[in-house]
Image: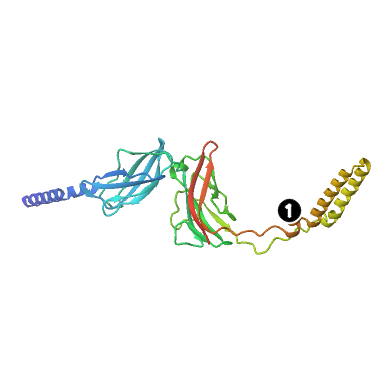
Amino acid sequence: MRGIVCRGSRLVLFAGLVIALVAPQLAYAAGTSTTTTLTAGTLSGCVQPLTVTVAAGAAPVTSGTVTINDVFNGVTPAVQLGSVSLNSSGSASPSVDLAAGSHSLTAIFTPAVGSIYVASTSSPALAVSVTTQCEFTVGVSNFIPSSTAANTLTLTAGQAGSFTITIAPSVEFTSTLTAPMFVTLACTGLPDGATCSATPENLEILSTTPESCPSGSPASACPPTSTMVIQTYAASTASASPDQGKRSNPIAWAFLLPGTLTLGGLAFGARRRRWLSRLSLLALVGLVTLLGTTACNPRYYYLNHGPPTNPATPAGTYNINVTAQSSNGVTGLTQTTTVVLIVN
């Protein structure tokens, strides 16, 4: 019996020793607290650069993701702006597009699967105020013909070129939409003899329209796009054909008009018996006859020779403003980007 008691005591002591050694590790594995910090860089138009750091005590946390949430104009629930992974230094540098208004930003850390760390949220919330209209942005890409210079279209007079326009709404803006919004596309700054057209001309933005297009996503899961074509013109090599439609005969008028005036003048002179009046009428008849026979008038020249040749689109470099405009019935929303057009 005494032997059994001794063996039992040893087992109890061994179990206690194991618990003493493993318990701290189990507590550590159950969850190591973390601290998430969110700071803001300099706001540039619609884009707000951010810096997020996550640490467990003094050690950086190098795995897991950080999600940026925003309470826009004090309206809850918060809108998720995006998610990024932590780098090897325990930080991330996302940039978010913000609509005009007040923003309350927080960063939420989510540990990787199987991690010993627990989630945490930055505090206090980071306040950002945006005064620029940033409801949506206008992007241009896929230039045809392609160019090594950014946002540049190089054409020869008479050639047409195209590029893709993307309207990317901010997440905060779409979260406030209660009805579809339509954006109309146009361009200004074209040289003489050049035109632009967008297909489609109007793009629809819904409350579900995403801000960006994930790789491999279908068009329905991407921001709306349109194709804009710029057409230039070469000089015409031949004059337009004269108008061959039904019109009066200039030769007939050259004889009929002077004859009519002559008869009228003779009748007037015979009644008045004034030689000065007769002389004046004869001079008028001679002038009209001269104009009728020589056809020195613009209409006669146009009808018989046609319009002049059309000039080519002038060579040069032009800044074309691509504009996207919409209105909610009260406030007009306009965003513009610039495309460089080079005509050779």
In this rendering, the answer to whether 242 lies above or below 35 is below
119 lies left or right of 132:
left
Residue 45 image point, x, y percent: 41, 44
Instruction: Decide which of 290, 253 is in the foreground and name it.
Output: 290
Q: Pick out the residue farthest to the bottom.
A: 237
Task: Say few, some or many: other residues with alpha carbon within 10 Å of mark 1 (under 14 / 14 to 19 / 20 or more).
Answer: few
Residue 124, quarter of picture: top left
Q: Amino acid at mark 1?
A: Pro
What residue is at 47 percent from the left and 62 percent from the top? 147
On screen, 65 above or below 175?
A: below
Of residues 76 and 223, which is closer to you in this image? Answer: 223
Looking at the image, which residue sits at the far left? 2
User: Residue 221: x percent and y percent?
Assistant: 48, 52
Q: Residue at x 86, y 44 (%)?
A: 276
On the picture, is 9 further left or further right than 147?
Answer: left
Measured as percent of width and height from the top left, residue 70 is found at 38, 41
Residue at 54% in and 50% down: 187
Of residues 19 and 247, the one drawn nearer to the viewer in this rendering: 247
The residue pinned by badge 1 equals: 298
Colour mode of the rendering: rainbow
Residue 124 in view of the camera: yes
Give the percent coordinates (x, y) of residue 105.
Answer: 35, 41
Q: In this view of the protein, which residue sits in the foreground, 134 or 192?
A: 192
Tell me, yes or no, if residue 221 can be seen here: no
